[in-house]
Amino acid sequence: MFDLKLQEIVSFLFGSDMGEVSLGIHYPPIDVYENPDTLCIEMEIPGMNPEEIDISILGKMLRISGVKKERLGNKGVRYLRMERSFGRFVRELEIPERFDLEKVDARSSDGVLIIKIPRVDSGTEIVRRVIVK
């Protein structure tokens, strides 16, 4: 929560050169939960095509980014009320060691991006001991 507010303040003060659109920062809501077999991440992306979403992995960091475009664009409309958000978004999540980032599955269904990451095989040790010499 603090990081989100800090990013909004930095974007407002320094403008879009800081990587976000001033006062137009868009953070699609996400839910992150786990069950005995899988880590699940669900993100609301109504109106976006799967090819407009970029999912990348760097180390243990999962990065979801894209641009949610305004449907009407510059078609000469004058909004009377605008509650939906548009613009560039980036969500980064650190994935715990107990999940296998080599087997990430991502799908889009009914305006929701669903990412599933399986647990590391139970036969694999997660905790490793280091011998002091």
Image: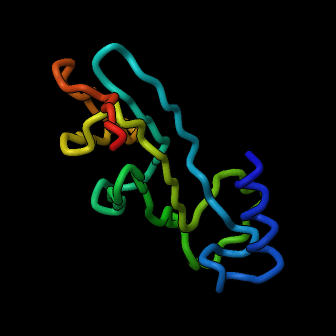
The reply, left or right, for residue 25 in relation to residue 103 is right
Q: Residue furthest bottom?
A: 17
x, y percentage for residue 75? 57, 77
When asked about the image quadrant of residue 10, the answer is bottom right
- Determine the residue positioned at 36% across, 40% down: 132
- Determine the residue positioned at 28% across, 61% down: 51
Q: Residue furthest top?
A: 36
The reply, left or right, for residue 38 in relation to residue 68 is left
Near-viewer residue (106 or 6):
6
Q: Is residue 96 above or below residue 26?
A: above
x, y percentage for residue 48? 40, 55
Near-viewer residue (109 or 73):
109
- Determine the residue positioned at 33% across, 13% down: 36
Q: Is residue 92 above or below residue 106?
A: below
Residue 82 in view? yes
Residue 55 in view? no
x, y percentage for residue 6? 78, 61
Near-viewer residue (56 or 29):
56
When asked about the image quadrant of residue 76, the answer is bottom right
- Determine the residue positioned at 64% across, 57% down: 85
When asked about the image quadrant of residue 59, the answer is bottom left
Marker count (numbered): 0
